[in-house]
Amino acid sequence: MASRETLRVVNLAPPVDNLPAFEGLRPVQRVALARIKAANGGLIAAGVGHGKFLISVLAPTVLNSRRALLLVPNALIEQTHQEIKRWREVYPIIEGLRVEPYSILSSKGGRRLLLDYNPDLIVADEAHALRRRESTRTKRLIEFYRTKSGREARFVALSGTLTARALRDFDHLAELALRERSPLPRSYRAIRSWSACIDVTPVEPPTAVDYREIAPLRDWAGGLPAREAFRARFKSAEGVVSTETSAYEGSLIFKPVAYDLAPSQVAALDNLENLWRAPDGRDLENHLDLARVRRQILTGYYTRWNPQPDPRWLAARSRWLQAARQYLIANRQGLDSLGLIADAAERGGCSPIVRAAWTDWAPVRHLPPPPVEAVWLTTHVIEQAEALARELDPAILWSESPFILEQLTIPCYGAGIEPPTAPGAVALSRRAHGTGRNLQHFSRNITIGLPPSAAVFEQLIGRTHRPGQQADVVELHYLTAEKTPREIKSLRRDARYLEQTTGQKTKINCGLWLTS
């Protein structure tokens, strides 16, 4: 285990950069750029609405980058180019700043992109997109930083929701950005011990951890409890910026809107929770599938293939995906995507299990999967949500699925459609527009149920509860069939974890939750 000396963190308080070129920036933005410059990288855990965009496009300037790559979510590509053009007239944003979506890292040419472009700086805006270290995009990014040229490249990560419920959500990002100055330990053994004492969902069960591993952290922090000790360490680390105040102090209210379940929903939920069986007769295999189908039923529908796939195609697909994903986790041959594993299996590479699965899957892999359709048990829930949007006009009805948007009569904005610039009663796809968008011209939001993730919910709230909002109160109305939705407890718990580890103030726990 690391000694107390290796846990020492420099308490950095750099002077604000007073260059005239940066006049007009918010204090958080100026401090962030100063710390990025001093640390030659950065981990910016600034809450939603603190102006991370300008930090992300000015970081290459303060680091004198010549080949900077800015990664953003797919839905924000066009908006990012427009904002760069707009702000280049005000601030010295470097020419040639390359902007790419995170998804390009997962493509077959993703590894080649990094090696050929050979960036001297990568800026990851909305860096929670790299949270899963086992994903292809994250593995390729880490792999690049292990190459000779990558070891010389800098990294800056920015996110308003850096972690969901575990240190493993961002320990790899901290290491890429800050290297030996990372506030987290760099060994898996130490990380799992810290996780057992700090996280909502520990890496290892408590019985598998030597708690002496956490002692140097608590000693460093003067005996504080583990989470408080980590927060102190994180916030004092060189190159880290964490915001303790909200970017917008206007009121935020969460209001439940009750609805009754239809008999068809009650029957479907009974089968789901007692038999783990979906409405189309499928037996579910894990809690994630169970939660997904439950949310669909509560909304009034479920999804199925139509027509049903050939059982042999389905079995071959299932065996291939299971074998390939297991190999993806364990392999050390640079095969970091399903496509590359398929190419290797075709040439006779990989393990015998993967080759056998590929032999069954290859002859049928080009057959198109059957279309997925929504089967509606009842439409009264979305009809009530749409009526509420009209009543509260202007208001945003947030949709979790394109199948919901298809049923609505108010204007709908899904993937690939820019959100409205004028207020009205509208429906927006949460996946397409629930991150990175400025929708301050709305102050009323509607959801059907509550998102299962605090990080997702925090991002969604931040679209309207942000600087520039003119309303005195931002409202979020959530339709619920339960007197006290089970998600509230987990959302507030996970938001509290974010506050207690990174020090960020969350909207979930600052807002007022009404009971009726």
Image: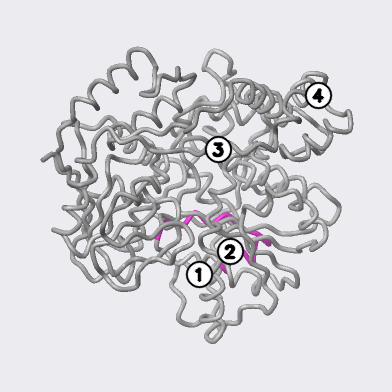
Question: Would you name the residue on which mark 3 appears?
Answer: 220
Q: What's the mark number on residue 35? A: 2
C-alpha gap between disc 1 and disc 2: 27 Å
Q: Secondary structure at mark 2?
A: helix
Magenta residues (range): 33-48
The front one of 393 and 363 is: 363
C-alpha gap between disc 3 and disc 1: 44 Å
Say whether disc 3 or disc 1 marks the residue closer to the N-terminus. 1
Looking at the rendered image, the quarter that the C terminus falls into is top left
Neighbour tally class for label 2: few under 14, some 14-19, many 20 plus, Cα within 10 Å: many
Q: Tell me: 419 left or right of 147.
A: left
C-alpha gap between disc 3 and disc 2: 23 Å
Q: Tell me: 105 left or right of 46.
A: right
Label 2 close to label 4 by CB (< 8 Å): no
Say whether disc 3 or disc 4 marks the residue closer to the N-terminus. 3
Question: Would you name the residue on which mark 4 appears?
Answer: 355
Amino acid of disc 2: Arg
Say whether disc 4 or disc 1 marks the residue closer to the N-terminus. 1
C-alpha gap between disc 3 and disc 4: 51 Å
Q: Secondary structure at mark 3?
A: helix
Q: Secondary structure at mark 1?
A: helix
Question: Would you name the residue on which mark 1 appears?
Answer: 79
